[in-house]
Amino acid sequence: MLFLMGIFILILFLISNPQEVSFHFLMWKSTYRLYEVILFGIIYGSILYILLSGHIKDVLRKKKER
């Protein structure tokens, strides 16, 4: 149920934020819609979490074997 509520809140954020956002990073300039930025952050964060949690579990397992 908590997962479904989170998805619902995410959809509300995505629908309610159609304005554009400008990024200026060093020499790179770009403009995206805010919901694209939110989706990218969620996808990137979940992939990073999966990778890091697997790595941390391996480190803890190796430390426990010693």
Image (cartoon, rainbow, N blue to C red):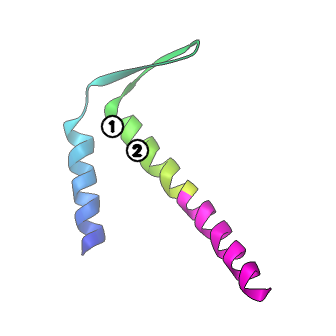
What's the residue at 56%, 56% (across, down)?
47
| Quadrant including the N terminus | bottom left
What's the residue at 40%, 36% (across, down)?
37
Magenta stretch, residue numbers: 49-66
Q: Is residue 24 left or right of residue 57?
A: left
Q: Say if the magenta span includes residue 33.
A: no
Q: Is residue 18 left or right of residue 50?
A: left
Disc number placed over residue 23 in the picture, else none? none
Query: How crowded is the residue under tag 2: few (<14 C-alpha within 10 Å), some, or many (20+)?
Result: few
Extreme residue toward the front, this view? 66
Amino acid type of disc 1?
Answer: Tyr
Q: Quadrant of residue 63?
A: bottom right
| Quadrant including the C terminus | bottom right
Q: Say if the magenta span includes residue 65.
A: yes
Query: How crowded is the residue under tag 1: few (<14 C-alpha within 10 Å), some, or many (20+)?
Result: many
Dot 2 corresponds to which residue? 39
Q: Determine whether label 1 and label 2 are within 8 Å by CB.
A: yes
Height in image: 55 above or below 26?
A: below
Amino acid type of disc 2?
Answer: Leu
What's the residue at 27%, 42% (across, down)?
14
Tally of numbered tags: 2
Disc number placed over residue 35 in the picture, else none? 1
Q: Quadrant of residue 34?
A: top left
> Depth check: 62 or 13 in front?
62
Under tag 1, what secondary structure? Answer: helix
Height in image: 35 above or below 49?
A: above
